[in-house]
Amino acid sequence: MSNIPEPDMNYLRKVLLEMLAIPSPTGFTDTIVRYVAECLEGLGIPYELTRRGTLRATLKGKRSSPDRAVSSHLDTIGAIVRTIQDNGRLGLAPVGCWSSRFAEGSRVSVFTDTGIVRGSVLPLMASGHAFNTAVDQMPITWDHVELRLDAYSATRADAEALGVNIGDFVAFDPLPEFTDSGHISARHLDDKAGVAAVLTALKAIVDSGVEPLIDCHPLFTITEETGSGAAGALPWDVSEFVGVDIAPVAPGQHSSEHAVSVAMQDSSGPYDYHLSRHLLRLAQDHALPVRRDLFRYYYSDAHSAVTAGHDIRAALLAFGCDATHGYERTHIDSLAALSRLLAAYMLSPPVFASDADPANASLANFSKQIEHEAHMESDTRVPAVDEVIGK
C-alpha cells in the first residue's frame, strides 16, 4: 500500500480553474503571483517575493541541507501589440514560442494602460465569401494575422483613441472545459496545471502533518516561456532541482494523458541520471503510472537554473498533454499521478546526503552510475598496455 498523503483533487480542480481565469502572459503576471501567494498563505507555507515576482517558498524539513527545489511557472504564452494598422486593426508579435496557427480564431483581451478592449485574432483573409479558396493559400505566420477590436476602430486614430498602444499585452481566452470523462481542455494548461499539481502536493503534505526529511523550496517562476525562468531564483544551497511542466502527447512521443512523465532529455541535453532514476523508483514503489520521454523542442526552468551556473542535479516531471501550446488537453489521471509523485519526492530522502557538503566532495562518496568494471566491459577489447608497448 502507498503511504503517500492523498491529494485533494477537488482542490486541484478549484485552483486550476481559478488560475485559468487569470490572464498571465509572460511580462503580465502580477495578478497570478498574488493569487498563488494567497494559496501559500492559506496552506501556512512561508514564502518570499523577488523584485519581479518569482515566489520562493519553504516547506521545512528535519534538516536544512542538502535541500531541494520544485519549480513550476505561472507565465503563459500570449502576444503583444506590434503595430497599429491604418485599418484600425492590430499587428501582433508572439510572447513565447508558438505558432500563429493556434492564434487564429481566438477571442482575446487587449490590456491597455487604461482598461481592457476585447477582440478576435483573424487571418488577413478572414471571409470565405469574399476570398473563397484563396483563404487556404495564406502562409501561417504572425505577419498574416491581425487583431480585430470589438469597438469602433476603422483607422489608426480610432484605435489610439481607445487607448491602444504598441506594447500592450494580449491574453488569449483559456476556454476551459472539465468533462465527465476526466479530460480537462483549455489553453494555458502549460503550466497552470503543473502549478495546481504542486500546490495540491503541498496541501497533501501539510494536511497529513508529516515532516519532510529535508527542506523543500517550491518555486513559482514568471519568465519560463521566454527562457530565463529559474535563473535567479535559487538563493539557497539547493542540491536537487525538479522542474514541473508539460509533456507533449504526440506521434513520436511516449508521454500519456493518463500518466506522469519523467523527461530523460530535452533541447538542453540529458537530465541528471541519479535524480531522474530516483523519481522513477518512487513512481514504481508507489505504483504510479509513469512514462520516460525525450522532448526535442523544449526547455524548462531546470535548464535556466543550470545555465545560470547553479551546481545542482536537475530533473523534470511533467503531466501528459495533447496539443501543447494550442488547445491543450490533459486528464485528471495524469495530474493525480503528478501530484502523488511530487508528494512522494518531497518526503523522500536526498538522493545523495553527501551533497550537503560539496566543499568536501571526494571520490569516496562520489556518485556511481554503474561499477567501473562493468562500465569498461565491451565487445571491442582494449589490448593490455604492455602488449602495445612491447611491439
Image: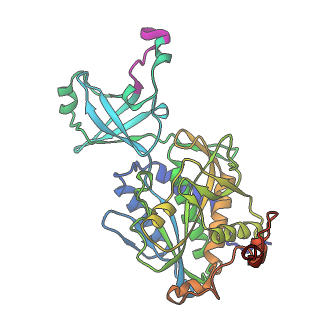
83 with respect to 211 (left or right): left
239 with respect to 341 (left or right): left
Asked if the magenta segment contains residue 165, the reply would be no
Q: Quadrant of residue 361?
A: bottom right
179 is higher (above) or lower (below) than 260: above
Q: Who is closer to the viewer here, 363 or 64?
A: 363
At x 68%, y 50%, the residue is: 255
For the magenta stretch, what is the residue range?
A: 122-133
At x 34%, y 34%, the residue is: 92
Kindly tell me whether residue 145 is visible in this rendering: no
Q: Who is closer to the viewer here, 363 or 238?
A: 363
Q: Tell me where residue 249 appears, x and y as whole percent.
A: 65, 45
271 is higher (above) or lower (below) than 20: below
Asked if the magenta segment contains residue 127, the reply would be yes
- The outermost residue toward the front is 391
Q: Who is closer to the viewer here, 161 or 314?
A: 314
Q: Tell me where residue 190 appears, x and y as whole percent.
A: 52, 50
* Quadrant that contains the C terminus: bottom right
At x 51%, y 39%, the residue is: 175
Q: Who is closer to the viewer here, 171 or 22?
A: 171
315 is higher (above) or lower (below) than 367: above
Q: Tell me where residue 380 appears, x and y as whole percent.
A: 79, 63
* Quadrant that contains the N terminus: bottom right
At x 60%, y 63%, the residue is: 271
